[in-house]
């Protein structure tokens, strides 16, 4: 006997539009910062390490707190947590906009990460509760994924326009109208959902989840930044892994754990979480570098550069649509693996074709291939993660998905960004004798140093810096191609037994 599944109606689909707002905001905030990086470097003069912290501390804290916030949403209500997060995110945005030092901006970005952690799990868990039909849920998650990835282009367009007329801090203020809109329409359109049997948030588990993530990220970041392994870095990673083991053991001993670690007994679930982390690791790290390349190496103004990024939105949407059509006839594992392979091809095209004087169309064409593959893989792995959990645990499952994604993104920005910086600095030191540390720390630093040099020396430094940055860009793309190539094979094998989705009759 076929089970009758309740299908979503007009209210749920309109509610989905509201839920895309936080997803759009999270990626807008990240990509807007990519555009503002040269202005941040010129105004606040952060070191290369400080600039990386400004970029990724948001993702670090979000990743560390997502599990806690997902569990909190299960207890107090996902809509309530979403709206509370909107208030916190808006307040932190104001603080970031008016930061007067690198340290102050890092602190503001950390507060944004805390606010973002309250937003992220609520959106996916509410989708899980609103869309019970598997095909409708898959389509809804596809829309959510398109909004999240589309924000990478929408954010720079708005931010680029602001940077043409205002100071860099204005890019954070675009969060405010978005949050106000969410606070107004959220209570009207989104249903509240919670787990009435939830026993509350375990404080020890919450501390362990955060304490496990941060040392690992710090250690990886320091190793990548210095291109060397030191005892303190290894000790930090080991401490984080040990705390992670303690966190898992505690979850297994609790009657009402923050995250049901038994889900990881399923190879398909584990593979989906791992694929999500690996895909975001490669693409987020590349995204930060690609935007700087278009602006600083090719010399394209922010708003024009943002408009050039629009085709990547189309590539993502095409990838999502193709995946949702194919998965009705082909195993999800093959579709996810094929998407990762297409993304790997995009990375390889960047590594093989991009040079210091390449046309912007070449870069965008390669990048569009990359994001089309990401679109194919991302929406399906998110659906596999969220759809595997019972409704009362939707917040925990959504937090697992978001934790994997945000941890992957934060690690990607740190590791791949550090690789790019290391290659850039080494290449510049070999090209320019006696170059200062400020110039080798970042491309923005080289521009700042050039402003104080005679014209001939300044031009020589800038030419060498652009060549060095391009070399870092292509080396990073090579790393991304290798990572996604491995993911393509692993995902295909691990998810090959997942059943084909059969459309439900109207």
Image (cartoon, rainbow, N blue to C red):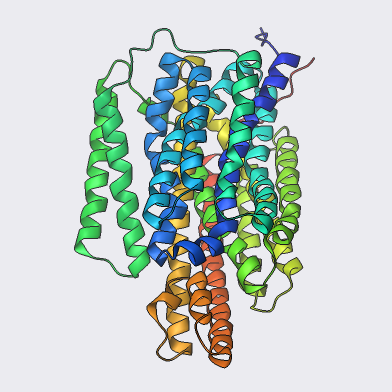
Q: Would residue 496 be found to the left or right of residue 113 on screen? A: right
The quadrant the C terminus occupies is top right
Task: Please report the residue visible at 47 percent of the width from the left and 15 percent of the height from the top.
Answer: 77
Q: Is residue 177 left or right of residue 329?
A: left
The image position of residue 445, as x and y in percent, is: 47, 72
Q: Position of residue 268 (x, y in %)?
A: 50, 35
x then y, percent, for residue 267: 45, 36
Image point (60%, 15%), residue name:
187
275 shown above or below 163: above
User: Does the rendering let one see residue 254?
Assistant: yes
Q: State which quadrant residue 210 falls in.
A: top left
Front-lying residue, 127 or 80: 80
Residue furthest to the right: 506
Residue at 32% x, 16% y is 256
Percent position of residue 471, x then y = 54, 76
Total number of numbered labels?
A: 0
Residue positioned 44% across, 12% down in the render = 195
Q: Which quadrant, please, contains the N terminus?
A: top right
Q: Nearer the viewer, residue 95 or 338?
A: 95
* In this rendering, position of residue 109 left or right of residue 356: left
Is residue 401 visible in the rendered image? The answer is no
Is 326 situated above or below 430?
above
Q: Is residue 15 above or below residue 248?
A: above
């Amino acid at each position: 006997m076929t089970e009758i599944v309740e299908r979503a109606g007009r209210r749920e689909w309109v509610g989905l539009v509201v839920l895309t707002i936080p997803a759009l905001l999270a990626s807008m905030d990240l990509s807007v910062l990519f555009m503002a990086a040269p202005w941040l470097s010129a105004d606040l003069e952060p070191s290369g390490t400080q600039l990386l912290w400004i970029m990724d501390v948001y993702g670090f804290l979000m990743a560390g707190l997502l599990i806690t916030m997902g569990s909190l949403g299960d207890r107090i209500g996902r809509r309530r947590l979403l709206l509370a997060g909107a208030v916190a995110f808006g307040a932190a945005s104001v603080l970031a906009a008016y930061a007067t030092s690198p340290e102050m901006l890092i602190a503001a970005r950390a507060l944004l990460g805390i606010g973002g952690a309250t937003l992220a799990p609520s959106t996916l868990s509410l989708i899980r509760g609103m869309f019970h039909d598997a095909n409708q849920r898959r389509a809804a998650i596809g829309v959510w994924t398109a909004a999240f990835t589309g924000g990478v282009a929408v954010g720079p367009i708005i931010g680029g326009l602001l940077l043409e007329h205002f100071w860099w801090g204005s890019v954070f203020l675009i969060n405010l109208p978005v949050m106000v809109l969410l606070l107004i329409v959220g209570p009207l359109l989104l249903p509240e959902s919670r787990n009435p049997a939830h026993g509350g948030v375990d404080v020890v588990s919450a501390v362990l989840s955060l304490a496990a993530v941060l040392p690992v990220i710090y250690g990886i970041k320091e190793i990548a930044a210095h291109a060397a392994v030191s005892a303190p870095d290894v000790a930090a990673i080991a401490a984080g892994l040990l705390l992670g083991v303690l966190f898992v053991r505690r979850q297994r001993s609790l009657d009402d754990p923050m995250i049901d670690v038994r889900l990881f007994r399923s190879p398909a679930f584990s593979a989906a979480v791992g694929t999500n982390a690996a895909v975001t690791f490669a693409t987020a790290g590349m995204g930060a570098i690609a935007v700087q390349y278009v602006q600083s190496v090719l010399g394209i103004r922010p708003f024009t550069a943002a408009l050039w990024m629009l085709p990547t939105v189309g590539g993502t949407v095409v990838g999502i649509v193709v995946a949702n059509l194919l998965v009705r006839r082909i195993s999800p594992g093959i579709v996810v693996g094929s998407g990762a392979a297409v993304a790997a091809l995009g990375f390889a095209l960047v590594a093989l074709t991009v040079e210091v004087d390449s046309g912007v169309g070449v870069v965008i064409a390669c990048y569009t291939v990359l994001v089309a593959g990401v679109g194919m893989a991302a929406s399906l792995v998110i659906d596999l993660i969220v759809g595997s959990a019972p409704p009362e645990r939707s917040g925990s499952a959504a937090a697992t998905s978001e934790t994997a994604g945000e941890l992957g993104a934060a690690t990607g920005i740190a590791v791949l960004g550090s690789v790019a910086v290391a290659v850039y600095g080494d290449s510049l030191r070999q090209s320019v004798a006696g170059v200062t540390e400020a110039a080798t720390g970042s491309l923005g630093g080289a521009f700042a140093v050039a402003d104080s040099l005679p014209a001939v020396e300044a031009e020589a430094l800038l030419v060498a810096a652009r060549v060095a940055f391009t070399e870092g860009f292509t080396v990073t793309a090579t790393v991304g191609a290798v990572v996604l190539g491995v993911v393509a094979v692993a995902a295909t094998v691990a998810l090959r037994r997942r059943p084909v989705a059969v459309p439900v009759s109207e």
